[in-house]
Image (cartoon, helix red, strand yellow):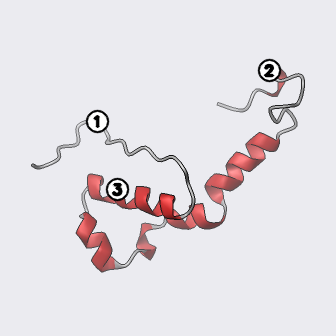
């Protein structure tokens, strides 16, 4: 959903596009972008997390926190079976 600039007539909430630009930079720029590249992880460490969805998501969450993201949610896709 695009940022609704018309909702903030004061400009206090980034009505000039600054919030959108900052959000895009946060996701696509620098350390955060590198955190999404799981191929950069040491293969031995990646194997400890496992190659299934849960392991890959947990690994990505750890990498995002290390990159400076302050809040991360790990959510499993519907139908994912986690062996116990």
- Distance of mark 3 from mark 1, alpha carbons? 16 Å
49 displayed left or right of 33: left
What is the number of the mark on residue 58?
3
Q: Would you say 47 lies left or right of 17 here?
A: left
Q: Earlier in the sequence, mark 2 or mark 3?
A: 2
Residue 17 x %, y %:
83, 39
Q: Position of residue 19 (x, y in %)?
A: 76, 41
Disc on res. 78: 1
Question: Tag 3's secondary structure?
Answer: helix
| Whole-number angstrom distance, CA of label 1 to CA of label 2 | 34 Å
In the structure shown, which secondary structural element does the residue marked by tag 1 occupy?
loop
- Up-down relation of residue 45 to residue 66 (above or below): below
Identify the mark nearer the N-term, 1 or 2. Answer: 2
- Give residue 16's quadrant in the image: top right
- Across and down, in percent, residue 44 comes to 28, 79
**Mark 2, other Cα within 10 Å: few <14 / some 14–19 / many ≥20:** few
Using a 10 Å C-alpha cutoff, classify the residue at mark 1 as few (fewer than 14 neighbours), some (14 to 19) or many (20 or more): few
Contact (Cβ within 8 Å) of mark 1 with mark 2 = no
- Residue under numbered circle 2: 7
The alpha-carbon separation of the residues under discs 2 and 3 comes to: 36 Å
Looking at this view, is 70 or 21 the one in front? 70
Q: Residue at x 50, y 59 (%)?
A: 64
Q: Position of residue 77 (x, y in %)?
A: 32, 40
Tell me if 45 is positioned left or right of 64 in this view.
Answer: left
Quarter occupied by the N terminus: top right
Question: Do the numbered discs 3 and 1 sit on residues whose CB atoms are within 8 Å?
Answer: no
- Secondary structure state at the residue bearing disc 2: helix
Q: Is residue 48 above or below residue 56?
A: below
Point 82% across, 36% down: residue: 14
């Amino acid at each position: 959903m695009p940022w609704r600039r018309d909702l903030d007539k004061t400009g206090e909430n980034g009505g000039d596009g600054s919030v959108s630009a900052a959000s895009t930079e946060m996701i696509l720029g620098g350390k955060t972008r590198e955190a999404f590249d799981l191929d950069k992880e040491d293969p031995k460490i990646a194997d400890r997390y496992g190659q299934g969805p849960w392991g890959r998501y947990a690994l990505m969450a750890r990498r995002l926190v290390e990159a400076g993201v302050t809040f991360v949610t790990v959510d499993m896709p519907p139908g994912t079976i986690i062996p116990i």
